[in-house]
Amino acid sequence: MTAIKNIKVINYSLCFIYSCLVVFFIAHLPIVFISVLALLCAWNFYVTISNKTKPNAWLANALAALALGLMLFSVGFSDTVILFVAMLLLSSLFKLLQAKTKKHYHVITTLTFFSLSAVYLFNQSILTTLVVSSLYILNFAVLGLLESKHNLKVASKQSGKLLLLALPLAVFLLIFLPKMPAFWQLPGPKLAKTGLSEQIDPFDIAKLSNSDELVFRAKFNDLAPKAPLYWRALVHDKFNGNAWLTSNLLKHNSVTQTKTQQVSSLTKYDYSIIAEPSSQKWLYGLNFATSNNDNVESDSLGLLRKKNYQAKSVQYTASSSALTNAPLLQWQTKHYKHLVNNDNNNNNKASALAYNLKQNLTSDRDFYNALLQYFIDEKFSYTLNPTPMSGNNTIDQFMFEQQRGFCGHYASAAAYIFRSAGIPARVVSGYLGGELNTDNNTLSVRQYDAHAWVEVYLDNEGWQIFDATAVVAPDRLTGSLSQNNELNNEFKSNLDFGLVSLSNFAAINWLRLELENLDYKWSSWVLGFDDEKQNDFLKSIFGSKNIWLVPLAVIVILGLTFVSYFVYLNWPKPATKLAPMVKEFEQLINWAKKRKLKIADHLTPTQQLQHLASQAPHVEQQLLEFSQLFNQVRYAKKPFNKERKTQAKYLIKLIKSTKQRNL
């Protein structure tokens, strides 16, 4: 069995790569399984640093079987992509724990390339790309160390050069290679990057807004509309006594109807959105939104949906107009007024409040204003840390006992009261506002901006937004939750650790905004470079009539690239590598010339050094020592190892510095 050079460096490098992968997958794998992977990384590191014998096959296989059982129990079978990634990481680390031959390490480095590529199933940001690219370089360096005697620094440098050589070709292929659909495709992981659900039951939630994950970015073609910005995602039209649900009627019957309703409304504003990966189909739009993108569909409620369940980022353009004012059909009026039977509903006080408010009022608009005034008069308050409530009368508990909550409490209670008064109403969930980045004029909407409100149908006005937050916490409507001074303490205490939680520091907040600006450009220009953008770009270069030049240009440039690379590899290169000690000897000759010492060209190197020593008695001893070292390496064939290199450098430095002191 051939001994592997640099075996320790190889093991350390692979341990480092998998440690980084474990840190990355903390957010996607169960903590129990992550702990197993971390222990395997630590075990591999300990075996390497302590020169311990690796575990035998029986022990390793027994532990692998236990770890596999724990993985299946903790990860489960519901998400096949997560299961695949977990098995890949587990098998690679156990293989590393048993690796002894060069063939074993070749298998591990191959698996490592797949493990690194799996990162892009979950995150494709520019920061992730930079980190993974660095780990790719390190893994290529490990592959090079298996076949060479170089150290890690040299191997990494060669690996980095190969990556830089491949980068222009990759950019060229991204721009010019036709965007063909995949012949096969893995299902995306079931990412939980949404703070929304088809069911709203706020009364059993103790905390809100603890995630600062990005949901989407929006950029308006012209000036952004004035606040508040209500980004609609879901409509909840069914009340079961505690929670508001999306009924099957809306799920299956809210398909796109005729284009007349959408075209007849005057479009107010156009914008583009880059939505982060999510396994859910819903997308985001203002008011009544429509989109002409091929991968997005619009429904009769003005909501946007993905056409496919692919868990990847989606970039689309949308147009928004006011909510519809078309008269409701009879079945629609009945549907949006419906409440559960009294047997399942004990919110009698809220029903009585609706009845009392409606007395002596002549219109639904008057009732709308009266309910808003009620929230003001009773001094309701907004909080991100409400007291959980349970039972069949949670709306009564909120309205007449707690009187403090967040958007979901107010939306659920208000919709119930409107329906109790015989006014059609529905709960809408989505996001409110967003943080404007003035560097690129984009609006970033994050998980903590999740919001719920009511849409109520008023005679002669159509659907109107009712949001009690406007009178309870009006500052919440002007931007992002992160910018609300009144709720700042609650917001920061709920939020997970991150740059947003440290945004009170001006320098950190500036860095956060700059990183977001860079990531937006990456998402828009690279990740969002789809076939539509590619066609527009190519037409701008070649024109719509000469588009046939594109494949010709691709073939010609690729051919020239490969020919140039072949010529480069086979071009005769001059031998520039000097023999040992020659470079050091020439340094002393140059030193002597600068000091105007006599150089005799007919003398041998040893005689030349002795001749210089006779002219410079103050460094005679050092020159003679250098002469002895020169003879050992050049004539006695002693290896020019690290110790002799260090000694030669030291003597040269001493000779030069001594001369300077004596001048």
Image (cartoon, rainbow, N blue to C red):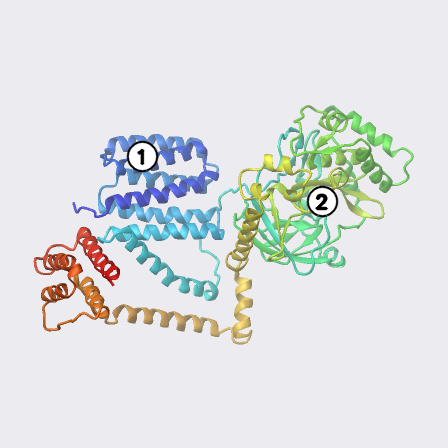
Q: Kindly identify which numbered label has been placed on residue 482.
A: none
User: In the figure, is residue 390 to the left or right of 181?
Assistant: right
Is residue 186 something one can see in this rendering?
Answer: no
Identify the mark nearer the N-term, 1 or 2. Answer: 1
> Residue 160, how many percent across, how many down?
35, 57
> Residue 292, how many percent across, how many down?
64, 58
For the residues labelled 1 and 2, the Cα–Cα distance comes to: 52 Å
Task: Write the residue at 40% across / 43% down.
Answer: 21
Task: Categorize mark 2 by other alpha carbons within 10 Å: few (<14), some (14-19), many (20+).
Answer: many
Task: Write the residue at 47% across / 74% down.
Answer: 549
**Could you say which is closer to the camera, residue 522 or residue 361?**
522
* Placement of 597 over or under 428, stated as above or below: below
> Residue 634, how many percent across, how many down?
11, 60
Q: Quadrant of the C terminus?
A: bottom left
* Placement of 402 over or under 583, stated as above or below: above
Is residue 32 something one can see in this rendering?
Answer: yes
Task: Write the residue at 73% across / 52% down.
Answer: 226
Q: For mark 2, give the secondary structure.
A: helix
Dot 2 amino acid type: Leu
Dot 1 amino acid type: Trp
Q: Kindly identify which numbered label has been placed on residue 477.
A: 2
* Placement of 193 over or under 382, stated as above or below: below
Q: For mark 1, give the secondary structure.
A: helix
User: In the figure, is residue 91 to the left or right of 648?
Assistant: right
Q: Which residue is mark 1?
A: 43
Q: Residue furthest front?
A: 663
**Could you say which is closer to the camera, residue 101 or residue 636?**
636
State yes or no: discs 1 and 2 in contact (Cβ < 8 Å): no
Q: Quadrant of the N terminus?
A: top left
